[in-house]
Amino acid sequence: MQKPFSLSGRQLKLIAMVSMLIDHIAVSLVARSSALYTPMRFVGRLAFPLYCLLLVEGFCHTKDRKRYLLSLLGFALISEIPFNMAVAGKIFDLEAQNVFFTLSIGLASLMMADEGKKRGKEWCLAVGYLLIPMLALLLRSDYSLGGVALILVIYLTRKRDKWRLLGPALVILSFGHLDSFGALALPLWYLYNGERGKIRYKYAYYAFYPVHLLVLGLIRMML
């Protein structure tokens, strides 16, 4: 069955960015009692599953996985203070860490597991699939262990037609409450055509995360 239209990786990334911006505006500046708060958070649930899908695509196609991981870790560190400002209204907060840490842990898990698969080392598989993901719990990164599990399931089911959407859907629904609405991103996954799309200034997409959080954080703290 031919799809009426399709979406490239670039288009999915732009959708995720807009969704994330709406979500963070709600978290930072909109009162929970407001009629806008919950609908904005629902829209915001699209972002994380889309970023997980794009991360797996990046893992499968990048020529330098170590550089990819270092880039994510670098932006995780850069983003932490803006994240604290926007989400908690203060510069230092150990209660939660930004989503770049979750993505970094997910990527590190994939790298270790893939190395174990190539070299036939079962201990690498165990470290990749079981131990490294636990860092998300220790760091209290955004989406925590469930977020890393979603990345791993997307990777493991990406070539299995029956499970390509169902597997990730089950993980997302297990998040519970508001985060389970991330399953609304699955129709967009279906429309993904597997093409990267024309992407200029790659790091501008990364920089959007700390920059918009910093702006929202400054506004929140001034108000």
Image (spheres, grey):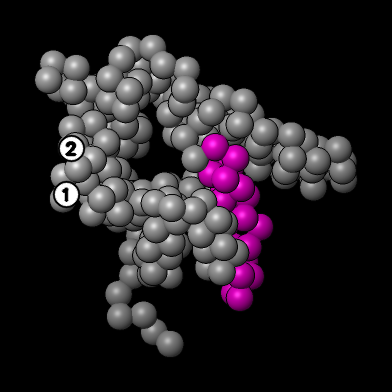
For the C terminus, give its image quadrant: top left
Is residue 181 in view from this perspective?
yes
Residue 50: x and y, percent?
41, 52
Secondary structure type for disc 2: loop
Horizontal arrangement in the rendering, residue 6 relative to residue 189 (left or right): left
Is the residue marked by circle 1 packed among few (<14), some (14-19), or many (20+) residues within 10 Å? few
- Front residue of 157/145: it is 145
For the residues bearing labels 1 and 2, Cβ distance under 8 angstroms = yes
Mark 2, residue position: 30
Amino acid type, label 1:
Leu
Farthest left residue? 223
Is residue 68 in view from this perspective?
no
What segment carries the magenta color? 144-163
- Front residue of 222/149: it is 222
Residue 157: x and y, percent?
63, 63
- Front residue of 8/174: it is 174
Q: Is residue 94 magenta?
A: no
**For the stretch drawn in magenta, what is the main secondary structure?**
helix
Residue 159: x and y, percent?
62, 66
Amino acid type, label 2:
Val
221 over 164 or under it: above or below: above
Residue 155: x and y, percent?
61, 54
CA gap between label 1 and label 2 equals: 8 Å
Mark 1, residue position: 36
Q: Residue at x 27, y 43 (%)?
A: 23
Farthest front residue? 33
